[in-house]
Image (tube, rainbow, N blue to C red):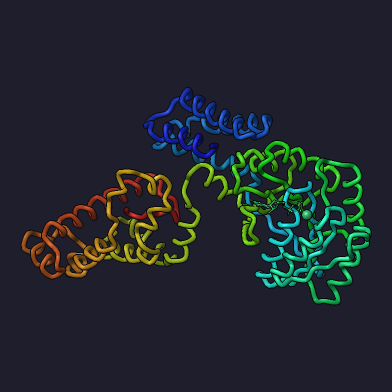
Amino acid sequence: NLAEKLQDTFDKLRGKGKLNEKDVKAALKEVKMALLEADVNYKVVKKFINKIEERAVGKEVMESLTPGQHVIKIVNEEMQELMGGSKEEIAISSEPPTIIMMAGLQGSGKTTSAGKLARKFAKDGKKPLLVAGDVYRPAAIRQLQVLGERLEIPVFSMGDDSDPVDIARGSINYAASHNCDLIILDTAGRLHIDQEMMAELEEVKAAVEPDEILLVVDAMTGQDAVNVAKNFDQRLDINGVILTKMDGDARGGAALSIKAITGKPIKFAGTGEKLADLEEFHPDRMASRILGMGDVLSLIEKAEKSIDKEKAAALEEKLRKNEFTLEDFMEQMDQVRNMGPMDELLGMIPGIGEAKQLKNLQVDDKQLDHIEAIISSMTPGERRDPEVINGSRRKRIALGSGTSIQDVNRLLKQFKQTKKMMKQLNSGKMKKGGFKLPF
Ligand code: GDP
Ligand code: MG
């Protein structure tokens, strides 16, 4: 699949110390093939690759310390951009009710997604109303009513011999009299793009002026989904897309082409048949997922929650002045520990989760306990200046902390290495706010 192929390509890049233009071009050729095989639109692929090549064969990348990582970073950024950059919100009207109109071909998942959205909004404190606007498909109304009953969300219906425009209009009065502040209009689809269907959707749109028209497309249909989106957008000027059936073996083509071809963002992804199976679509997270970069975002979110910003700034200052002591070392470790068990954290770092040589490495929280005990057994003077720790002091510290002299030696060595690394970072290009954890 796409993710595996791209990750293979990038593993090869990472393995290389130095890169030349030929290496980058060869890797990009592989990326191109993988994207085409994943059914990404040809024009989109071409533009995407050109953009990356422009950025990646420059001097800055080739001469960087980690050229492979640098190229991957560029691919990640461009892939994120391809899918729309940042997450797009649903427009909530300042004057209720907000009206969301669903559109899409038959079987794409409109009715199911209407239910999923209603559930999501109800959880966010909204009072949704589901509207049964598909008067053609047998049992379509019943399908929505069943969803409504399960969710305990009201469903407005006028039976199947009413006009969809009347139903849409009627739902506004119904919402007002039932305290609903969000209307989700289910509509009828056809098997193929059909002028009659489009005309009807246009009439509904004109009658109720929805705040959002969400087009539902099936990710499994690949390029067809993209063509469908283009067609619907030309007629209805949609606000966004719900890409369904992402749980199936969709190849990625639709997710990566829709924004580039239509200019309209994917706002949600359907990931299963259950009502809870709806995810907000984050282009950044999706790109990282495709490229196998681990859940770095969740890791960062965790770090932001548990690392004290002021302490971090103070520490950074010390690092700059090369005044980093064992006490700081311990404090920093504490902060890392606040983030959760070590092996869980390591699992979120790209590449490390799967790295074989690390499988056996016990990332033992007990080890951290040891380190803390050792540092606690030192005098303040020793913590500030470990150089004074001679043989007899080492023995005392080992005894005091319930560890061995070897443990003490190991820690002192680790600290020395960390400090050396910090010094290098300092003399290099440590950006403000970008201090690195010493392990
Ligand atoms: P509509 O004709 O556009 O209203 O489509 P439906 O909502 O009736 O859905 C058609 C079929 O697709 C149903 O069997 C749904 O359970 C299924 N479906 C919808 N969304 C998803 C999804 O995200 N994942 C999976 N696996 N099935 C879905
Ligand atoms: Mg339906």
**Residue shown at 90%/58% (left/top)?**
164
Q: Is residue 64 visible?
A: no
Quadrant of ligand 2 in image: bottom right
Q: Position of residue 199 (x, y in %)?
A: 91, 47
Q: Can you tell which quarter of the image residue 67 is in?
A: top left
Q: Position of residue 27 (x, y in %)?
A: 49, 28
Q: Is residue 105 left or right of residue 309?
A: right
Reply above or below: 148 against 426. below
| Camera-side residue of 218 and 209 | 218
**Residue shown at 89%/56% (left/top)?**
204
Q: Position of residue 344 (x, y in %)?
A: 39, 58
Judged from this view, the residue extending furthest toward the top is 22
Q: Can you tell which quarter of the image residue 16 is in?
A: top left
Q: In the rendered view of the protein, which quadrant contains the N terminus?
A: top right
Q: Can you tell which quarter of the image residue 53 is in?
A: top right
Q: Is residue 202 visible?
A: yes
| Camera-side residue of 297 and 395 | 297
Q: Position of residue 198 (x, y in %)?
A: 88, 46
Q: Is residue 326 left or right of residue 86?
A: left
**Residue shown at 48%/24% (left/top)?**
21
Judged from this view, the residue extending furthest toward the left is 392
| Camera-side residue of 367 and 3 | 3
